[in-house]
Image (cartoon, coloured by chain):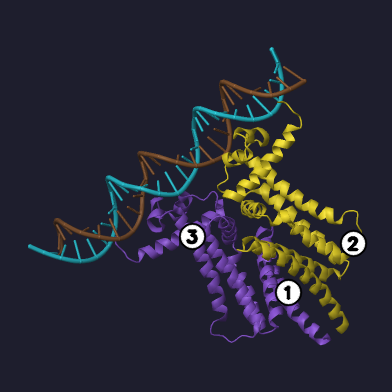
Chain colours: A purple, B yellow, C cyan, D brown
Amino acid sequence: MPRPAMKHVRQQQLIDATLISVERYGLQHTTINTISGTAGMSSGIISHYFGGKQGLIEATLKYLLSELKQALLIRTSGKTLSPVTRLSMIVEANFTELQRSNAVTKTWLSFWSQAMHDPGLARLQHINSQRLYSNLLFSFKQLLPDTAAVNAAKQTAAVIDGFWLRSALSSTPEQDFKQAQMLSKAFIETVILQYGENQCRH
Amino acid sequence: MPRPAMKHVRQQQLIDATLISVERYGLQHTTINTISGTAGMSSGIISHYFGGKQGLIEATLKYLLSELKQALLIRTSGKTLSPVTRLSMIVEANFTELQRSNAVTKTWLSFWSQAMHDPGLARLQHINSQRLYSNLLFSFKQLLPDTAAVNAAKQTAAVIDGFWLRSALSSTPEQDFKQAQMLSKAFIETVILQYGENQCRH
DNA sequence: CGTTATTAATTGAGCGTTCAATTAACAACG
DNA sequence: CGTTGTTAATTGAACGCTCAATTAATAACG
């Protein structure tokens, strides 16, 4: 059955199966058997398409990173948005349904803890962390003086990641994620408003 | 060598060795051999004192939780502090030298990802998360109306956890932690000040 | 000498990787 | 249109390794 398109399909199926397996068993107890079993294939296929378990793990992380990137692009590219609206879009991109899903939250957390000991994963994690900051900074600079914009961007990045983390670990993730999104946007308003107030008094 | 005090000492030595091992190899590659080797003992001792590897892991997490609790108590108990000062103390307690150390950041992250699949660890994590929020809420309620205080406490908890996470994963943790502490306090000032401004206009 | 503390060796389950064998699809050819 | 050769896709058993737990032996006290 030599089908050239098969490779692409199989790889995505295995990535999906990895997410499901991590959701069910955690990364620690995810084995090539739990993954290949979930995908309805045999264990050998993983080494064949990804060179080994580690290769599949990294491919899965890259997939999540690209999904996060696209979530923002869909909301912004081609459109002309006000800085405040664009900041809202950044928040929303980080709280999409996919990002809130159990499978993905568990996977992100597992990857983060692994990233501290794996230079390859650390690099990917760092790129992602920087991207959030850069995106925020771009919009804040259109609203605030540079120094204030830098601080606002750093604080907002922390708020988003912090809310995301606390929601993911919460016993009621659904409602916590929803409120997290609101409070993140409220936080941005506060930061901007605060500067306006200060300016009145100076 | 039956020394009654030995038990206590050995247990703490093994907990310390666990932290060192997690720092060096990550929780994933931390084995009873890397721990007992670091402690200068043999592997069997872990089962003897903790019933197994998992028991030692949980004891180590409990140790970190108690250290975090004490860091705040030392800064507040017995003293009469203004609400704003107390909020500063809460921030500082979450960014102590111990909490910033490589061994501890790696350990926390590993535990968090495990907590999503281990009810025992999840319970401990949840208690800790709630404690930060409760502590913040207590002081904010002395400064703001209830609704505003609740939101401020949630946002501040997210800021602290978010900054902590981003600093821990940063390639320059030292300076990032330092700035994180500053910007966390700055946010608290902003929230309080912001409310004062609003009141003038209403 | 009995008790407790500790070690060192052993066990057995679980894991990722490898690879020879199998299957399925297409292509070339008569 | 059927036969055959070729190639890619896939399987799953076998292998070697790692690790947590167990065990029995040793050492240090009272």
Q: SS at mark 2? A: loop
Q: With respect to residue B168, does A133 lie above or below?
A: below
Q: How far apart are labels 2 and 1 at the CA level?
A: 27 Å
Q: Are marks 2 and 3 on the same chain?
A: no
Q: Is residue A56 left or right of residue D30?
A: left
Q: Secondary structure at mark 1?
A: helix
Compared to residue B202, the image places residue A29 above or below, namely above
Residue type marked 3: Glu
Check disc 1 and report the residue beneath it: A187
Give the letter of the chain under mark 2. B
Q: The disc numbered 3 marks a residue on which chain?
A: A
The amino acid type, in three-letter code, at marker 1 is: Phe
Q: Nearer the viewer, mark 2 or mark 3?
A: 2
Using residue B91 as the reference point, say whether residue A3 is left or right of it: left
Are callouts 2 and 1 both on one chain? Answer: no
Q: Which residue corresponds to the image point at 65% horizontal and 66% vertical from the top-left?
A: A161
Tell me whether the residue at label 3 lies in contact with that at label 1, contact meaning CB atoms closer than 8 angstroms: no
Q: Nearer the viewer, residue A101 or A57?
A: A57
Q: CA distance from mark 3 to mark 1?
A: 34 Å
Residue neighbourhood size for the residue with mark 1, other residues' Cα within 10 Å, grouped as few (<14), some (14–19), many (≥20): many
- Which of the two residues, B133 or B22, is positioned nearer the viewer here? B22
- Asked whether A104 or A127 is in front, the reply is A127
> Is A20 displayed left or right of B40 in the figure?
left
Provide the residue designation for mark 3: A58
Q: Position of residue A93 (x, y in %)?
A: 60, 73
| Percent x, y of residue A153 | 67, 75
Q: Secondary structure at mark 3?
A: helix
Residue B81 numbered mark, or none: 2
Q: Amino acid at mark 2?
A: Leu
Chain letter of mark 1 equals A
What's the distance in space between the residues labelled 2 and 3, CA to CA? 49 Å
